[in-house]
Image: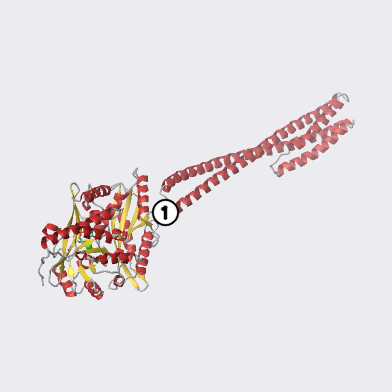
Amino acid sequence: MRRAKLVSTERIFIVGIAAVVAFASLFAVFMLRTRAEQGSIDRAIAAARTQVELSHDLTQAAFLLTDGVSATAGTDVDDLARELERGHLTLRYGDSVIGFDGVDDPSISMAFDRAGDVLSELALDAHLLQQGAQPTATVTTVVAGAETYQAEISRVVDRLSQISSQSAVRSQQFQLAATALLFVLVIGLLALMAHRQELSLLAVKRAPDQRDIDQLTGLVRRAYFREQLTAALDATADGAGYTAVLVIGASVRLGVQRELSPRTRDRATQEIARRLRATVRSTDLVAKVERNVFAVMMEATPRVDDAARVAIKLRTAVEAPIQLGSLLVQVDLTVGIALAPVDAESADELLMKATLAQRAAIEGDDYRYYSADLRPETGSRLQIVSHLREAIDTGDQLWLAYQPKVRLDDSSVVGYEALVRWDHPTLGALGPAQFVPIAEESDLILDLGSWVIDEVCRQQAEWLDVHGATVPVSINVSARQFRQGDLDDVVGVSLDKHGIPAEIIEIELTEGVLLDDTRAPIDNMERLRDLGVRIAVDDFGTGYSSLSYLKRFPIDILKIDRSFIRELSAGNQDAAISTAIIALAHSLQLEVVAEGVETGEQYGVLQALGCDTAQGYFFARPMAADVVEHGRPRLVAVH
Ligand code: C2E
Ligand code: CA
Ligand code: CA
């Protein structure tokens, strides 16, 4: 897009230069020609004037001859006749001198013709005089002839002067017009050069190559987006408006029909990408930054709310149902916005803040701008990264909160989910939403993940030691760490180190990891299972997974995402969806966990639907290990 713009501007630039050069040469040729023509006219005028003078002299000579004949009969006749003869010769030669190029004027040629005739007669008369013919009559003829010639040649001179002045005016007008045009062309060229300069600055932002492009959607990837954003921030550092980053989470719903084949899912993603691109301006950059997350960069937006307007436009365009064959796919967008230089000045921070805003945006919000309350102000991404590095190395700022998992039929606690927490001396208490996504951008997540795994194993060993028994603890593992392929080693090492059985460890993976087309995720899961660890699919229903897809994977537990539980009540659509998930999961011998149960009503509905277990504030919030009442039911059934 940017490249096309550059190329077309380069073309204009080259055409511009060619036009100026062509025009300048034409102008030069014309000026030379005009000058030659003018010179030729001037010479002709001079020659014609000489002729006028000569013919005048000739007339004088003829008069003298007449006078001479009457006064001093015979004496001077010969001299005068010779003078006339000379004058005639000069006249004749003068005739050819008057010819010039470039002027084709009928009145001049007519005058010449007539002058020519007169000249012949004059020559004849002069000759007769010399031969001693009757002078008076001849002289009269000579005089008349010379006068006629003089008149004709004067007409030529007049006409030539007229042409000369016309040509002078014309060439003056032309010069003026040419100068004006040249001026305009030069100004245009200068403007183009300035523009080109600007473009060449843009060109520093290199065009994406194959590695930068997401194969599925044709959009650029995160790394390229970051690079472009950095370049844009550098280019607008002198403060031409705002650079806006919109982070857009897209979730796809299928209504009651929840089967979504990978192909359909891909086509939905392609359509979302297409709509995003079609909605923004060609100068805005659209990227696919994560599996279901897109980003838009808008450069030099004059107003703070321009990005909001775009967000609304995007939602209108993308949330229109997508018809894919017989399926009608519904897309929900959540849009987070951050602006430079208001919210951040670096690409990473801007992206991070827009991401925070996006995560904070809930369904129904058109968009959400980043605001300071979304995170501690002091925590820039870089700060987080370096502090987190330190926290992992020392291990004393990180701790795990444990949220009970309760069996719905008897309310007994059958497990815990470990949720990481970070208490930083200056940044304060941070939740995983504030640092896990940042850690996931680098290998830091691997170290964090390994720390969590080891800490859970250590804690389990301690509980086993103190209580003699324990319940399984589930550990959230980032997709990045899972794809690394050595999770079984990492878990195995900690199990051995703390001497605990694998059966009391569960691994929670998000749906995303199931979407890999290769056998790698299945192999990774099987190796974990070979250890004796159980595997749960977290946040089920938010990604593109389908139940038929689950069949392929060695999974033990399915966690229904909180978004289906939030508005759950008997007989509503979410209840229908939960019913379907529970029934199908059971047919695949999977345990079903409902996440985020907050009310007695939700609890009741889930119990009625035959859901196995649940977690949520209704039972207990995540708590520190030392307040966990181990193995005891936290709540008696409400029904
Ligand atoms: P998650 O795996 O879906 O974890 C459940 C989240 O829901 C937790 O948020 C939990 O505190 C919260 N929650 C539990 N019950 C309720 C409820 O009744 N209502 C509401 N509104 N929320 C409830 P938390 O601890 O902030 O964790 C957020 C996310 O961060 C987790 O979502 C998980 O994806 C990630 N996470 C947490 N710990 C780790 C970790 O150790 N490693 C990795 N990779 N990710 C982690
Ligand atoms: Ca989880
Ligand atoms: Ca979850």
Residue closest to the far right:
132
Residue 200 visible in the snapshot = yes
Under circle 1, the secondary element is loop
**Does 178 sit left or right of 532 as displayed?**
right
Query: Mark 1 belongs to which amino acid?
Result: Pro
Q: Could you tell me if residue 538 is visible in this image?
A: no
Q: Nearer the viewer, residue 310 or 236?
A: 236
Residue 472 vertical placement versus 110 (above, below): below
Query: Disc 1 marks which residue?
Result: 208
Position of residue 387 measured from the top left corner of the image (x, y, whole percent)? 23, 48
User: Is the image coloured rainbow, by chain, by secondary structure, or in one colour?
Assistant: secondary structure
Image-based side of 223 in relation to 510, left or right: right
> Closer to the camera, 41 or 268?
268
Q: Quadrant of residue 569?
A: bottom left
In the displayed structure, 544 sits above or below 233; it is: below
Ligand 1 closer than 8 Å to label 1 CB: no
Q: Which x, y percent locates residue 594?
A: 20, 68
In the foreground, 611 or 451: 451
Question: How would you rate the neighbour count of disc 1 (Cα within 10 Å): few for under 14, some for 14-19, many for 20 or more?
Answer: some
Quarter of the image where the N terminus is located: bottom left
Residue at image location 42% in from the left, 45% down from the top: 201
Q: Return the x and y of residue 53 as percentages of the image width and height.
A: 74, 31
Q: How many marks?
A: 1
